[in-house]
Amino acid sequence: METSHTDNRNQYALITGATSGIGYEVAKLFARDGYNLILVARHQQRLQAVTDELKTLYAVEVTPLAKDLFEQDAAVDVYQHTKDMGITVNILVNDAGQGQWGPFLETDLQRDVDIIQLNIISLLTLTKLFLKDMVQRNEGKILQLGSEASTTPMPLLSVYAATKAFVLSFSAALANEVKDTGVTITVLLPGATDTDFFHKAQQEGTVGYQEQELANPEDVAKDGYEALMKGESKIISGAKTKMHVWMSDLMGTTASAAKSRKLNEPSEKAGKGIVHEASRAEREAIKTGTGKADGDMDKE
């Protein structure tokens, strides 16, 4: 399926978290429209499989970059790698992110710190480095992956929600700072989406996963991609998510936190609830592409 969008042939999009979920779907949209890709993810084998797939389907240049953005220096290494290759990154997509389910008093401290490193520090670092270049050129776009969780406290997923609140506030502030340049910053707020996030967060046994319909990652990616291309500063994906965000604003933090907690409580239907095909298939693809066992919640 070779792309017909030849105008984008010399444009590069760098996407983190590009081998699964929303990041993977966004990568396909860029490839469809003829952008060359730099894909960043942790596992080399899975990364190479996605690279080969996109090159074959869309006949674009795809550069795999295996970096673990949980590591302190990884984001700087990603930036330096593009410089060493002489590549101008026209579009940055900060998609990589994880959460950890459970009461804060019981979650592992290092896991909490790792999530902050991935969701905030690496995102901030990549944004700082690439944004400077974009503003100097007076050209560029950045898509930040926020969440419905950006707008409400989430008991039993507290650190994740707090990191996404940072992403929303940070992105909105930067969008204002660069409004008089040729650079735009868009933050995407999806609701709960049918990806491997729940497995990595050990959240599969909750009411939210077992008993609720989840957003389609293809639809979420399309919403984010279209808003990015239009230069919009924020996009809430899906009518249900828009309603949830509106209700959270109306209810206030205390009531909103109580409502969120109900979705994060263990479900009595665990193992017997709704079958979420997209995240199931994604987990199988990750297993195949990394050699990891199904129970492995290792960093992706």
Image: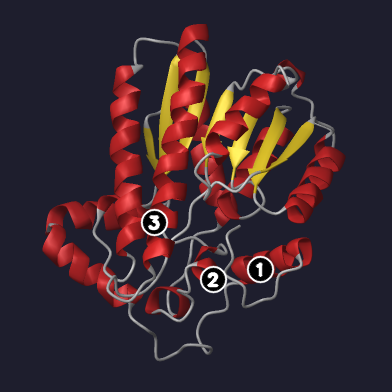
Return the disc, 2 or 3, that comes first in the chain's sequence.
Answer: 3
Mark 1: few/some/many CA within 10 Å (<14, 14-19, 20+):
many
Q: In this rendering, is residue 16 above or below 262?
A: above
Tag shown at residue 12: none
The residue where tag 1 is placed is 283
Question: Real-space Cα distance between discs 2 and 3?
Answer: 19 Å
Q: Quadrant of the C terminus?
A: bottom right
Mark 2: few/some/many CA within 10 Å (<14, 14-19, 20+):
many
Q: Quadrant of the N terminus?
A: top right
Find residue 206 and report its image quarter. Answer: bottom left
Q: Residue at x 29, y 21 (%)?
A: 176
In this rendering, the label closer to the viewer, 1 or 3: 3
Q: Contact (CB < 8 A) between labels 1 and 2?
A: yes
Q: Residue at x 65, y 51 (%)?
A: 42
The residue where tag 2 is placed is 199
The residue where tag 3 is placed is 113
Q: Is 148 situated left or right of 299 in this image?
A: left
Q: In this rendering, is residue 143 above or below 97?
A: above
Instruction: Give the residue type at disc 1.
Output: Arg
Question: Real-space Cα distance between discs 1 and 2?
Answer: 8 Å
Image location (x, y in percent) of residue 180: 35, 10
Image location (x, y in percent) of residue 265: 33, 80
Question: Real-space Cα distance between discs 1 and 3?
Answer: 25 Å
